[in-house]
Image (cartoon, helix red, strand yellow):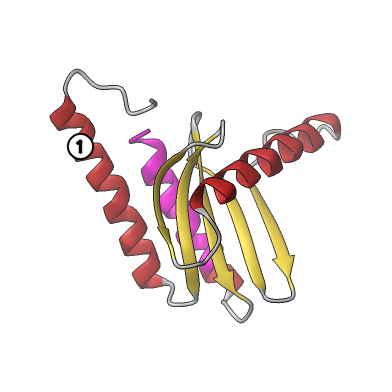
């Protein structure tokens, strides 16, 4: 896993910190219906999902979306993929880069304040990048 450490206690501390970051983000954004930290391969690292969709399915779809988004950004010479925003009639899905090995996924209600969501997710992703 990407939380490689010299001992299990340190790994547990990192996992607890990741979960604390997700909890803090969710409490700052009441319109957030779910959050997950997902490896770039689609494996769940941590989540706070308040949806009926299966966590493994969300992670697999995230990895597929991320792969396609990375390819589009590369092919169109737009640099490095930073975030993906998917807007649906019932809400938003935001996939935000969280370092070399993971992404932060946010599922928000349709009426969420996008600017605040993006800002808070960016800050959380930067914190996560230092842990993963």
Please name the residue that numbered disc 1 is placed on.
12
Q: From the viewer's perspective, is residue 20 above or below residue 66?
A: below
Q: Residue furthest right?
A: 76
Position above or below: 116 against 75:
below
Count the labels in the image. 1
> Residue 23 at what x, y percent from top left?
32, 61
Q: Could you say which is closer to the camera, residue 13 or residue 120?
A: 13
Residue at point 23% right, 46% down?
16
Residue 85: x, y in percent? 68, 57
Residue at image location 48% in from the left, 70% down from the top: 32
Q: Which residue is painted at 43% across and 44% down in the image? A: 126
Q: Residue at x 52, y 70 (%)?
A: 116
Label 1 neighbour load within 10 Å: few <14, some 14-19, many 20+ = few
Judged left or right of residue 58, residue 33 is left
| Camera-nearest residue between 107 and 122 | 107
One can see residue 28 in this view: yes
* Residue lying furthest left: 9
Q: 70 or 53, which is in the foreground?
A: 53
Q: Residue furthest bottom?
A: 111
Residue 96 visible in this rendered orientation of the protein: no
Q: Is residue 122 magenta?
A: yes
**Residue 130 painted magenta:** yes
Locate the C terminus and report the quarter of the image it occupies: top left
Percent x, y of residue 10: 17, 30
Secondary structure of the residue carrying numbered label 1: helix
Magenta residues, dominant SS class: helix
Q: Is residue 14 left or right of residue 83?
A: left
Q: Quadrant of residue 7?
A: top left
Q: Quadrant of residue 48?
A: bottom left
- Of 109 and 114, nearer the camera is 109
Q: What span is colored magenta in the figure?
A: 117-132
């Amino acid at each position: 896993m990407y939380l490689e450490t010299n001992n299990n206690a340190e790994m547990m501390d990192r996992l607890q910190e990741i979960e604390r970051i997700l909890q803090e983000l969710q409490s700052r954004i009441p319109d957030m219906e779910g959050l997950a930290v997902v490896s770039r391969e689609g494996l769940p690292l941590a989540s706070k999902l308040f949806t009926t969709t299966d966590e493994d399915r969300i992670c697999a779809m995230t990895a597929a979306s991320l792969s396609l988004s990375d390819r589009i950004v590369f092919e169109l010479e737009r640099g490095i993929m930073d975030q993906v925003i998917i807007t649906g009639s019932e809400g938003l899905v935001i996939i935000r880069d969280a370092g070399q090995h993971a992404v932060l996924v946010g599922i928000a209600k349709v009426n969420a304040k996008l600017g605040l969501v993006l800002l808070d997710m960016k800050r959380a992703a930067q914190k996560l990048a230092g842990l993963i």
